[in-house]
Image: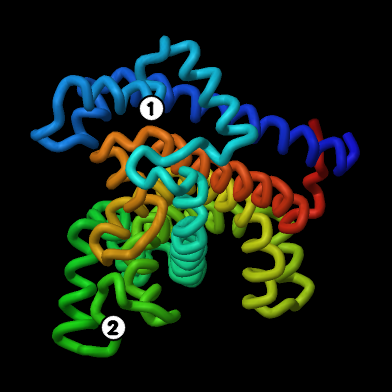
């Protein structure tokens, strides 16, 4: 299969996946108890007001008709009008905060890889030592400690006890405001990648071609980085890609802790207000983000290991 055909195939598969996720979310949100009209209206609203609002929002249409309208909004009308802000489309609200979530996710991934790769290399080259045991404990802590605990502890340490970083809030801006949220969100991924990287590197270091490279007189750092690490990155990319959904899902908690505008916070607020178009637009944005990053990871396989070729 040619690279172009592979790319088109993956884009098509990603589009179908996003449509499936959005459709399931459409069914799920309409299965929730309660009526959006009751949430949007205050206690003084009459039955006539409620019926008029339901008609204006097309909530009185049969569910199949609402689904067809949803597909039309998805394709042509920016996911329809927000129930709360009737002068904006749902997707325009998403676009206002989408870059913030993408920046947070990318910084969290960068933090995770920056922490995990050196620790994995350190542990893999010193098996059975105290260093190996310490790295194992650190990786378990990263995987076990919840963001709800890590975030506030980091704020207390670096914003209160040691006021090196800006206090979180809606007014916080600049690169410094991303440090603590990125650490909070990337800690779990760093723990997983460290454990996986340590195991993968140990396996690779036992391979015959590593012994051959050492016999040629190459430096240990060259053997480790150019030969062993490059092969070990393939399973790490797979694990990292599989964790992206959890990482983006964790953005809901992290954005709430640090009061950052983003998809997670927008999704939570829209869900509480039963703003159906915005909820579905957030789900579509999450799906598109995951699909694009998965495509990038698939293309990186061939870059990391030239033996891997684009295949069907």
Residue, disc 1: 56
Secondary element at tag 1: helix
Secondary element at tag 2: loop
Q: Residues within 10 Å of mark 1 (few under 14, many from 20)?
A: few
Q: Residue at x 74, y 70 (%)?
A: 215
Which of the two residues, 59 or 3, is positioned nearer the viewer here?
Answer: 59
Left or right of 10 on screen, residue 264: left
Residue, disc 2: 166
Q: How many marks?
A: 2
Q: Is residue 64 visible?
A: yes
Which of the two residues, 294 or 131, is positioned nearer the viewer here?
Answer: 294
Return the x and y of residue 152 as percentages of the image width and height: 18, 67
The quadrant in which the C terminus is found is top right
Return the x and y of residue 255 as percentages of the image width and height: 31, 59
Quarter occupied by residue 138: bottom left
Quarter occupied by residue 75: top right
Which of the two residues, 242 or 90, is positioned nearer the viewer here?
Answer: 90
Q: Residue at x 72, y 36 (%)?
A: 10
Return the x and y of residue 113 as percentages of the image width and height: 50, 65
Q: Is residue 124 visible?
A: no
Q: Which of marks 1 and 2 precedes in the sequence?
A: 1
Return the x and y of residue 160 as percentages of the image width and height: 15, 83
Q: CA distance from mark 2 to mark 1?
A: 45 Å
**Above or below: residue 213 compared with residue 240:** below
Closer to the camera: disc 2 or disc 1? 1
- Looking at the image, the residue that sits furthest to the left is 43
């Amino acid at each position: 299969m040619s690279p172009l055909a592979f790319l088109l195939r993956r884009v098509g598969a990603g589009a179908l996946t996003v449509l499936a996720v959005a459709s399931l979310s459409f069914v799920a949100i309409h299965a929730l108890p309660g009526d959006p009209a009751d949430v949007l209206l205050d206690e003084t609203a009459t039955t006539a007001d409620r019926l008029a609002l339901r008609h204006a929002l097309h909530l009185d249409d049969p569910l199949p008709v609402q689904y067809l309208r949803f597909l039309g909004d998805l394709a042509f009308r920016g996911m329809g009008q927000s129930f709360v802000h009737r002068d904006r489309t749902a997707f325009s609200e998403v676009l206002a905060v989408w870059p913030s979530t993408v920046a947070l996710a990318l910084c969290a991934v960068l933090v995770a890889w920056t922490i995990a790769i050196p620790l994995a290399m350190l542990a893999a080259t010193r098996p059975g030592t105290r260093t190996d045991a310490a790295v194992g404990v650190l990786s378990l802590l990263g995987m076990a400690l919840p963001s709800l605990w890590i975030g506030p502890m980091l704020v207390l340490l670096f914003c209160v006890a040691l006021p090196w970083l800006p206090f979180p809030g809606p007014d916080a801006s600049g690169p410094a405001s991303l440090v603590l949220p990125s650490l909070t969100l990337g800690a779990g991924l760093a723990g997983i990648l460290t454990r996986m990287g340590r195991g993968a590197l140990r396996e690779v270091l036992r391979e015959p071609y590593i012994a051959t490279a050492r016999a040629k007189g190459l430096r240990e750092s060259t053997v480790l980085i150019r030969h062993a690490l490059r092969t070990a990155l393939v399973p790490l990319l797979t694990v990292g890609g599989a964790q992206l959904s959890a990482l983006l899902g964790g953005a809901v908690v992290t954005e709430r802790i640090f009061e950052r505008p983003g998809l997670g916070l927008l999704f939570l607020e829209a869900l509480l207000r039963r703003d159906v178009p915005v909820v579905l637009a957030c789900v579509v944005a999450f799906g598109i983000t995951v699909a694009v990053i998965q495509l990038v990871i698939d293309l990186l396989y061939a870059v990391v290991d030239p033996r891997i070729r684009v295949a069907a």
